[in-house]
Image (cartoon, helix red, strand yellow):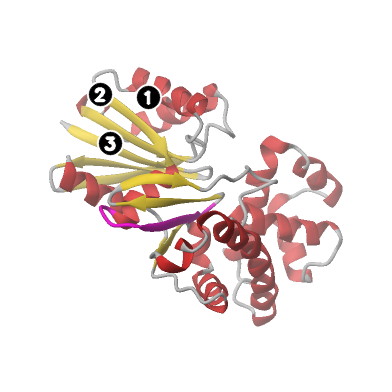
Amino acid sequence: MSILIADGGATSTSWAVVKGNDHQIVRTSGLNPTLKVDAEIESVIFDELSLLINSSLVSEVYFYGAGCDEFKNSNRIKRILSEAFRKAEITVKPDIEGAGIALFANQTGIVVISGTGSSAGFMHEGSLVDIMPSKSYPAGDFGSGAHIGSLILKDFFVDEVPVEIKELIQARRRLSIDELFVQFQDPMKSKLIASKALTDVITSAEFDKPMHQEYLKRLVFEAIEPLFDQLKHHFKNALAQQSLRFVGGTVAVFEHHFREYFRTKGLIIDKIERTPINGLIEFHQTHD
């Protein structure tokens, strides 16, 4: 029998099927229950995941997911997973706990996620003992891909982005500014729209141009500032005294900018990982 480990985000979900020292990683669409209704979650698990793995061979499922810090959301995910993996024991925990386990294992320190969304927590000898309170996008998720993407779109709507980026967004979205603006006002869609806008930019040929790098650096610093203020307010002296580690696609892309910003505050980020899945695999292989 195998164990199944999931790192569930808003944009994509990584699943690792682990048996002894061997593992296989597959990916599906995102599974943030804050952004998806039950039918959409069921579609990902029953239509996408079921084509990639044999559910009858799974004895345990560990799902670490964005939006699963709320009992109502984690219970929805657990119920649907229980229907898909009827022989398995299901464990659902928030993504920040998965990130903490992946980056710290049994050590102590502060872990920060900067992916589509953002969050932070304090790990103490392998346990998540504190989660930094934060609101969801657009009132929160500071320093995330959605936050940086929203700053790009706000400039786009008032015609203050570099012209190549403006043309890129229009071409990728195939919408007029007015049509995109209307979609952006939908609270259920805006986070993914903003995150996709950033993805459009960083995966384009325009990304490496010096003028665009300068433009993005300014926006990244603008997005990190309120995240830093949150960290400083919540963790206080521990922020300077404990190891600080980051995980997520956004911080991985803008690693240099994140490190530079925190250095200006007298802090060193001692580890950055794009995804927690490899750390989670190693942890569960060691502890299960």
Residue type, mark 3 in image: Leu
| Distance from the alpha carbon under mark 3 to that under mark 1 | 11 Å
Q: Are marks 3 and 2 in contact (CB under 8 Å)?
A: yes
Labels in figure, total: 3
Please tell me which of labels 3 and 2 falls first in the chain. 3
Give the SS element for disc 2: loop
Q: In the image, is 211 to the left or to the right of 176?
A: left
Vertical side of 118 occupied by 67: above or below: above
Q: Quadrant of residue 209?
A: bottom right
Q: Which residue is mark 3?
A: 4
Q: Quarter holding the N terminus?
A: top left
Q: Which residue is mark 2?
A: 88
Identified at 62% across, 42% down, the residue is 136
Circle 2 Cα neighbour tier, 10 Å, few/some/many (<14 / 14–19 / ≥20): many
| Distance from the alpha carbon under mark 1 to that under mark 2 | 9 Å
Identified at 70% across, 80% down, the residue is 211
Identified at 23% across, 29% down, the residue is 58
Give the SS element for disc 3: strand
Q: Are marks 1 and 2 in contact (CB under 8 Å)?
A: yes
Q: Residue furthest left?
A: 20
What numbered label is drawn on residue 81? 1
Vertical side of 48 occupied by 266: above or below: below
How far across and how far down the image is residue 249, in percent?
Answer: 49, 58
Q: Which residue is more in the foreground, 33 or 156? A: 33
How far across and how far down the image is residue 266, in percent?
Answer: 52, 77
Give the SS element for disc 1: helix
Identified at 68% across, 39% down, the residue is 189
Residue type, mark 1 in image: Leu
Magenta stretch: give its range: 105-115
Circle 1 Cα neighbour tier, 10 Å, few/some/many (<14 / 14–19 / ≥20): many
